Amino acid sequence: MARSLFGHSADRLAKRIPWLRRLLWAVESGFLRLTFAFLRLLKPASAAGFGAALCGLVGPRLPKSNHFRRNFAVVFPDHGPEQIENLVRESWRNFGASMAEYAHLDDIAHGKRGAGIETVVSEKIRAFSDPERPAVFVGAHMANWELPARAIVDQNHPVTAIFTPLQNPGLDALLHRCRRALGCRLVPASESVRPLIAELSAGRSIGLIVDQKVETGEPLPLFGRDKMTTLVPARLALRFDCELVPVQVQRIDGSRFRVTIFDPVEPDDPHANNAEKARQMMAKVNRHFESWIRENPGQWYCGNRRWPKLVSNAEDIKSIGATNPHTKSGGSGNRAA
């Protein structure tokens, strides 16, 4: 959680001093528990508004925001500094709303207290009509990215959501309890694909968030620049002869959402080898992400580097410095986070 706000500096310091790390974990966990208790007193939309206001005020001032600025500059090369800064602020606001909504995942999942999910489902998904057939669902860090799992469960289709555990065990346990409202099986992410293979082998669908850059991926185009993209979802879909299904989530108003479950992604060339089929399928997934981000750029959480460092050329860095009103020219705020 702290890394999401402050980047890696505090995390590196805590790793060097074990007692400081334990202290920070205890403070962080206690603070979040109190915050969630407060947020539960509010309606979901009010809690989301509180989180949005707080992160919209603080987030753009943090060094981590330079990642947002670089990423949005790639997506919208014609945008000026003020337009980019507005997107950074909106993205932080959506992040803050999503964090506050952990305290209300049960309300959102069950359509209570003015919150809820409406789902639009493709009729071409065979997995929903055949309970013996699993699928691989993929999404991006859009709106509240926890909610597609619930929308899939609402189709009477069991799914296993793959999540990245937090380093702070107290926070991890708290969020795990919140996620139970999603009604899905939860499996922590691993450097190995074995947990994913185990789920699909048992006939259970899996859900993955795959819009981040990965070190071991393939360079595939995203907004006209190659982004290191994982091929694992497509490879698994091909291996188990199941569907690769993009899932979009949009924040409609307050804590009301629309989840769209799209047609399965197919390779362009059915006669290509599996490696090439996987590249073609994930390239199509990236094109879905492009469409979703262009439609709702302020709902995209892009607080991590999406493209290789070569994106940060002199012109980009100059643009970032001009965009950021919270750093002085020549100051350390213009450095890569």
Image (spheres, grey):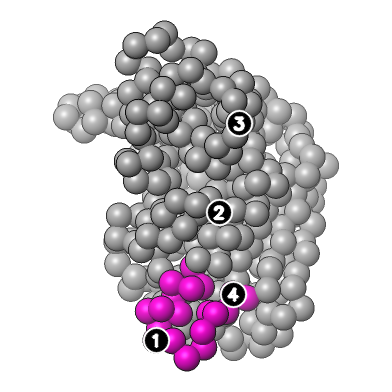
Q: Quadrant of residue 172?
A: top left
- Residue at the far bottom: name it: 271
Question: Magenta residues, as a range?
Answer: 264-282
Q: Nearer the viewer, residue 294 or 112?
A: 294
Q: Nearer the viewer, mark 3 or mark 4?
A: 3
Q: Is residue 128 above or below residue 140?
A: below
Q: Amino acid at mark 4?
A: Val
Work out whether mark 1 precedes mark 4 in sequence or the reverse, and give the earlier one: 4
Q: Badge 1: few (under 14), some or many (20 or more) residues near its Cα, within 10 Å?
A: few
Q: Name the mark nearer the viewer: 4 or 2.
A: 4
Q: Earlier in the sequence, mark 3 or mark 4?
A: 3
Viewer-closest of 167 and 82: 82
Q: Which mark is residue 265?
A: 4
Q: CA distance from mark 1 to mark 4?
A: 16 Å
Q: Amino acid at mark 1?
A: Asn
Q: Which residue is mark 2?
A: 140
Q: Is residue 23 above or below residue 326?
A: below
Quadrant housing residue 56: top right
Amino acid at the residue labelled 3:
His
Q: Residue at x 18, y 27 (%)?
A: 17
Tell me whether the residue at label 1 lies in contact with that at label 2, contact meaning CB atoms closer than 8 angstroms.
no
Q: Which x, y percent locates residue 155? A: 72, 71
Q: Earlier in the sequence, mark 4 or mark 2?
A: 2
Closer to the chain start, of discs 3 and 1, is 3
Residue 42 lies, in percent from the top left, at 73, 29
Secondary structure of residue under mark 2: loop
Q: Work out whether mark 3 precedes mark 2 in sequence or the reverse, and give the earlier one.
A: 3
Residue annotated with mark 1:
273
Instruction: Report the residue marked by disc 3.
Output: 79
